[in-house]
Structures are given as structure tokens and as C-alpha cells.
Image (cartoon, grey):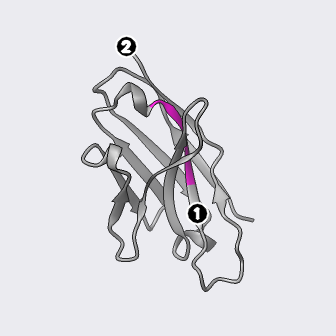
């Protein structure tokens, strides 16, 4: 059984920082492409960050220089450090695992989502 369990999030003032974590089942952690998405009220879910094929962080333009994706390969945990948060970062954040193209199993897995609210 595959699980993605998120923690972190909450309420923070503009300019503040938050860290999100996602504990991921070890059977997919080293195989799947791991990343973060978010969904603001009334909007579609959008890509935030993931690791590219070289293992480098890949970010949407609006978070570059502010967010950092990381992974702990011993704890099977994916993290997102968010600095200099803005009100427009307010959303439900989801961790995500996408199978490689060569993998027979095509299911995309999602965490349960965690609320991030940036407000004064």
C-alpha cells in the first residue's frame, strides 16, 4: 500500500516561513518523481516544485528563490521550505509522486493536503 502523509503548514504573516514534510512509502520513494503542487480557492491545482532527472530542484517561476525542495533518503521524506511567503502563496499544498514512463503501474499518488495561509 502506498501512502503519502503530509505535515506542517498553518498560518503565517507575509514575509514569514513555513516548512512542509511528506512521509512517502519506501517502495516508491526512489523510483517515482516526487514533488509539490498547490491549489488556491477557486483555482486549479498547480505545480510548485519537483526534482528533475538530474536530481536538481525544479520550480515554478513564482516561487523561485523563495522555496526549496529537499528529500531525506533515509527517512523517506520529501520537504518544502517556504521563505518570504506572500498572500498569493495561500493554498492547500499537496505532495505528489509520479511513476516513471517505463513503469507499468501508472497511478499518480497524492498526499492528503495541508493548508498554508499567509495573512496579516
Q: Which residues are magenta?
A: 90-95
Instruction: Give the dominant element type of the magenta stretch: helix, strand or loop.
Output: strand
Q: Is residue 19 visible to us here?
A: yes
* Image position, residue 87 (x, y; %): 39, 25
Q: Which quadrant holds the C terminus?
A: top left
Question: Is 64 included in the stretch rendered in magenta?
Answer: no
* Image position, residue 37 (x, y; %): 52, 49
Q: CA distance from mark 1 to mark 2?
A: 33 Å
Q: Is residue 76 visible to us here?
A: no
Secondary structure found at label 1? strand
The tag on residue 120 is 2
Instruction: Kindly identify which residue carries mark 1.
Output: 97
- Left-right relation of 64 to 90: left
* Image position, residue 35 (x, y; %): 49, 58
| Residue at the image position 57 percent from the left and 78 percent from the top | 100
Q: Which quadrant holds the N terminus?
A: bottom right
- Left-right relation of 89 to 1: left
Q: Is residue 9 above or below residue 101?
A: above
Secondary structure found at label 2? loop
* Label 2 packing within 10 angstroms: few (<14), some (14-19), many (20+): few
Front residue of this view, candidates 11 and 88: 88
Q: Is residue 41 above or below residue 67?
A: above
N-terminal-most mark, 1 or 2:
1
| Residue at the image position 59 percent from the left and 29 percent from the top | 41
Amino acid at each position: 500500500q502506498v501512502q503519502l502523509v503530509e505535515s506542517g503548514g498553518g498560518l503565517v504573516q507575509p514575509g514569514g516561513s513555513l516548512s512542509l514534510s511528506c512521509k512517502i512509502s519506501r517502495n516508491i520513494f526512489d523510483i517515482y518523481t516526487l514533488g509539490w503542487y498547490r491549489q488556491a480557492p477557486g483555482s486549479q491545482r498547480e505545480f510548485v516544485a519537483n526534482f528533475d532527472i538530474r536530481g536538481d530542484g525544479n520550480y515554478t517561476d513564482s516561487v523561485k528563490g523563495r522555496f526549496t525542495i529537499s528529500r531525506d533518503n533515509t527517512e523517506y521524506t520529501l520537504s518544502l521550505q517556504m521563505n518570504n511567503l506572500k498572500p498569493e502563496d495561500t493554498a492547500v499544498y499537496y505532495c505528489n509522486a509520479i511513476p516513471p514512463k517505463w513503469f507499468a503501474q501508472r497511478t499518480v499518488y497524492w498526499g492528503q493536503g495541508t493548508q498554508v495561509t499567509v495573512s496579516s
